[in-house]
Image (cartoon, rainbow, N blue to C red):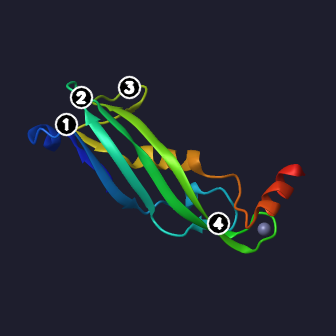
Amino acid sequence: MMIIDIRKLNAQKKYFGSMEFDYEAPETLIGIPYVKFASPVKVELEYDLYEDDSLEVKGKISYRLEGQCSRCLKETAQDVEGELDAFFEPKKDSEDYSYTNGVVDLTKAVEDAIMLSLPFGLYCAEECESERYSQ
Ligand SMILES: [Zn+2]
């Protein structure tokens, strides 16, 4: 579970820090045919906990995609990196991410970051990628 326990951080006076973990992302996030995650998504982040209990999270996600080239169907793989940037507020009706009961669940923020970072296709070579976009 990707959880940051705000009550615990406050109790320990850990108002900033970093975390690193792996996330078994659901394959349904990927919209490219015959492509899947080759490994769990690696999440590296830094957090800042403010006086009003809002939490800022910034970091990086990285993962490897594997499957068939979107053009020639050859087996291939690609390393992808994306930005994680989220701001959580301790209430229900905020515009951004929010949390209740003193615990932040990072799942949605990480899944959003994965979706933003996903390429439109997986290509075995630059040739295949440029051919695809020139059509
Ligand atoms: Zn190809």
Q: Looking at the image, is mark 3 or mark 2 earlier in the sequence?
A: 2
Rendered position, 19 above or below 70: above
Q: CA distance from mark 2 to mark 4?
A: 40 Å
Relative side of 33 to 18, left or right? right
Q: Secondary structure at mark 3?
A: loop
Query: Which residue in the protein does label 4 denote?
Result: 35
Q: Residue 86's spot in the image, x, y percent?
A: 41, 36
> How far apart are labels 4 and 3 at the CA level?
35 Å
Q: Secondary structure at mark 4?
A: strand
Q: Secondary structure at mark 1?
A: loop
Residue lying at the far front of the rendered structure: 126
Picture coordinates of residue 48, whole percent (x, y)? 27, 35
Disc 4 vs disc 3: which is toward the camera?
4
Q: Earlier in the sequence, mark 4 or mark 3?
A: 4
Q: For the view shown, which residue lies furthest in the bottom direction?
A: 75
Residue identified by numbered label 1: 15
Q: Nearer the viewer, residue 117 or 29?
A: 117
Q: In the rendered structure, are the residues bearing label 2 and label 1 in contact, judged by CB atoms less than 8 Å apart?
A: yes
Residue type at the position of mark 2: Tyr
The residue to which callout 3 is attached is 94
Residue visible at 14% across and 44% down? Answer: 8
Specify the quadrant that holds the N terminus: bottom left
Position in image of residue 117 (x %, y %): 57, 48
Q: Residue at x 69, y 61 (%)?
A: 122
Regarding mark 2 in the picture, which secondary structure is present there?
loop
